[in-house]
Image (cartoon, rainbow, N blue to C red):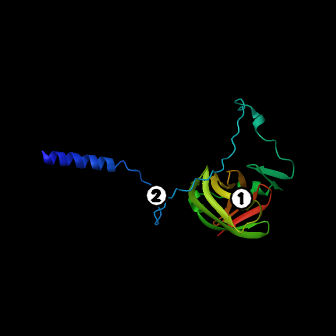
Amino acid sequence: MRTIHAVAGLAVVLALAGCQRTSMTDFGGNTVSPAPLQAQPVATVSSGQLAAPGDTSQFPAAPVSGTAAVGGVQTPGGTEVAAAANALDVTKESMVGNWRVSNAGSSCDMFLTLTNLGSGSRGGTRGCAGELTAMGSWEVAGKQVVLKDRNGNPLARLFKTADARFDGSTNGGQPVSLSR
């Protein structure tokens, strides 16, 4: 009978011990609370009515003489059209790694990864000036490589012109080249 009482008493003590409050403390015995999480920026959301099927008004107007538009990037003289027409095939895997960037007479570094970021993959620049300082991601779309800002907006479009070379332009019309 004593054993039953001892076992029952031990069970009650263990059950109550499991109900004790636990908290984080530092080495001095002071209670420590975790730091609050910081709010993260959220991209703006827009809404609107979709165009009716077959409505051609959703397409931009044709470019004016002397300029060409490829994927929303205006280039003087249509040089990007020629690059697009003669572009070599490109794979996402072949883009991964470090690239030397030539942009508007200066050079900098770009590093591309396969880590997902939004609709593209994570990438970044170091030592660049102008539009490419905002680069945060990239993607391959057909035969072109699209460099994007941290919000997923296109910054530049490039086409493979040689084994380790890509040429194109920024949205502002500045020529851009990647090489290894």
Rendered image quadrant of residue 125: bottom right
Q: Position of residue 22 (x, y in %)?
A: 42, 53
Front one among 46 and 69:
46
Q: Secondary structure at mark 2?
A: loop
Please give the residue where the numbered disc 2 appears in the rendered image. Answer: 24
- Establish if 62 lies above or below 67: above
- Establish if 165 lies above or below 157: below
Q: Amino acid at mark 2?
A: Met
Q: Which label belongs to residue 134? A: 1
Q: Report the quarter where the C terminus lies.
A: bottom right
Rendered image quadrant of residue 135: bottom right
Q: Secondary structure at mark 1?
A: helix
Front one among 157 and 5:
5
Decide if residue 164 is on the left or right side of residue 70.
Answer: left
Q: Residue at x 70, y 36 (%)?
A: 47
Neighbourhood count class around disc 2 (C-alpha, 10 Å): few under 14, some 14–19, many 20 upward: few
Q: Nearer the viewer, mark 2 or mark 1?
A: 2
Q: Position of residue 106 (x, y in %)?
A: 77, 70
Neighbourhood count class around disc 1 (C-alpha, 10 Å): few under 14, some 14–19, many 20 upward: some
Q: Quick one: which residue is furthest to the left in this view?
A: 1
Front one among 153 and 96:
153
Q: Position of residue 11 (x, y in %)?
A: 25, 47
Task: Answer with mark 2 or mark 1, whichever residue precedes in sequence.
Answer: 2
Q: Position of residue 110 (x, y in %)?
A: 66, 65
Q: Residue at x 19, y 49 (%)?
A: 6
Question: How much space separates mark 2 and mark 1, taking CA atoms?
Answer: 40 Å
Q: Amino acid at mark 1?
A: Ala
Q: Report the quarter where the N terminus lies.
A: top left
